[in-house]
Image: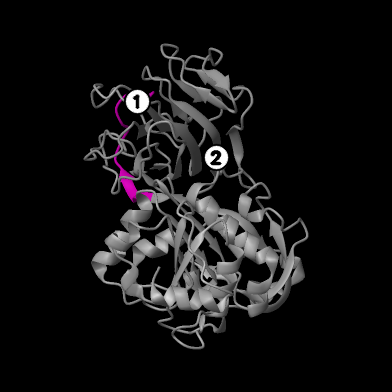
Amino acid sequence: MSTLTSLCLALLGGVQEPAADLPRVLFLTHSAGFTHGVVRRPAPEQFAHAERCLLEAAKGRLEIVPTQDCARINAKELAGFDAVLFYTTGELPIADEDRAALMEWIRGGGAFAGVHSATDTLYQYPPYVALIGGLFDGHPWHESVKMRIEAPDHPAMAGLGADFGIEDEIYQFRAFRRHPVRVLMSLDVSSIEVERGKRADKDYAVAWCKDHGRGRVFYTALGHRPEVWSDPRFQEHLVRGIQWAHSGPEHSPAPPEGAEVLFGGGALDRWQHRGGATARWIVADGAFQVAPGTGNLVTRAELGSGLYHVEFMVPVTPAKNGWQDRGNSGVYVQGRYEVQVLDSLGRELRSGDCGGIYGKHVATVDACREAGRWQSYDIRFQAPVFDDAAQKTANARMSVWHNGILIHDDVEVDGTTAAAMASDERPKGPLMLQDHGHGVRYRNVWFVPGDV
């Protein structure tokens, strides 16, 4: 334990040796822009109010290591921590290689959490903007507000109650989208003068989580006022959010309003085999699994432009298996454009690897998880465009997020991919899941229509 940590803990009532088995959390409270009162230290050797509150709230559950030194964000230091928590502002003085090391550490399985102004920092570093899920765009409300608890089953929401309200500074965000971000809590707009906000959709998320490759992210916009940090409800919200990011249960997002649920855990009544035969894949434990040899599944409905969400799990296969013999399947938008499913973790990626638009585009990032873990695709698809003579005037386009990471950014797909159900292109077609002889599992499949 460092001298500074010992001195600061002494101020809390005595030096406490950290338990060896507790997850270690590096709590960075550096202010390169506005300095919030809750992270302003009275003196260098004294912790700020937020640091003291979190040390006390996390006692026995997390080992909190507060720092205002951005130099601690580097590959060597990160190797000694399980989670990183930001309460920061401005363009942090972190070297390029150290920022990249942070992103790689999270993508490789590290836990990242942000509080309040963690969205008001590193604006000029696109990987961080993508990681955190939104950017500060003003705080129209500083008053008592009510919240909508959108994911009451998430550990970070436990104990808040359905009618949770609080007085705090409330942010609004730009560069924010609900998917692949999974909103946990949002502002109840009936409790405020909503016209003071900027968002046309009146969607003011307050807390969310997301996967990031093998890692996870938790963010809460609360935490401006000292009274909030002293509030046991907020303390539990934050501690449990950090714990979830480190090692909590998988959180599968509920289908959004307006979604067409293609599989929600029950029967395969919205699916069939090619030719109309009843679906024969195996349904168990809220998921369905390829029954090798039965053939591809297609939705009964034909779908077009919109957002497709699919969760999948590739099975563990023998190490001796060849490249395409490792949990092979595929998600075919319109039955024609495949996003490959495969155990590709740690491989030099090709267009036939997991996340590849088969034969067309290689995933820009290895966002894979280990075989035997649930993974997700969020696919924004714009169908090809045709004129009145049925001649194609614009190719299909796709953006793909794999486990929360953007791996294809509005790429053009100039035709159908290999093993498509048809070689022609159309404005609509069924979603198809491939039987490639492996017991790949799927769950939580839904579609939100609309041009993108």
Identify the residue position indicated by label 2 in the image. Answer: 447
Spot occupied by residue 159 in the image (x, y as percentages of width and height): 72, 56
Q: Secondary structure at mark 2?
A: strand
**Residue type at the position of mark 1:** Asn
Query: Magenta region: which residues?
Result: 406-421
Quadrant containing the N terminus is bottom left
- Vertical placement of residue 309 versus 80, above or below: above
Q: Residue at x 74, y 67 (%)?
A: 165
Decide if residue 2 is on the left or right side of residue 52.
left
Which is nearer the eye, 437 or 334?
437
Q: Residues within 10 Å of mark 1 (few under 14, many from 20)?
A: many
Q: Residue at x 40, y 76 (%)?
A: 3
Of the residues under marks 2 and 1, which one precedes in the sequence? 1
Spot occupied by residue 443 in the image (x, y as percentages of width and height): 53, 32
Q: Residue at x 43, y 83 (%)?
A: 33
Q: Secondary structure at mark 1?
A: loop
Numbered mark located on residue 191 in the image: none
Report the label total.
2
Identify the residue position indicated by label 1 in the image. Answer: 328
Residues marked 2 and 1 touching at CB (< 8 Å): no
Q: Residue at x 25, y 37 (%)?
A: 351
Q: Residues within 10 Å of mark 2 (few under 14, many from 20)?
A: many
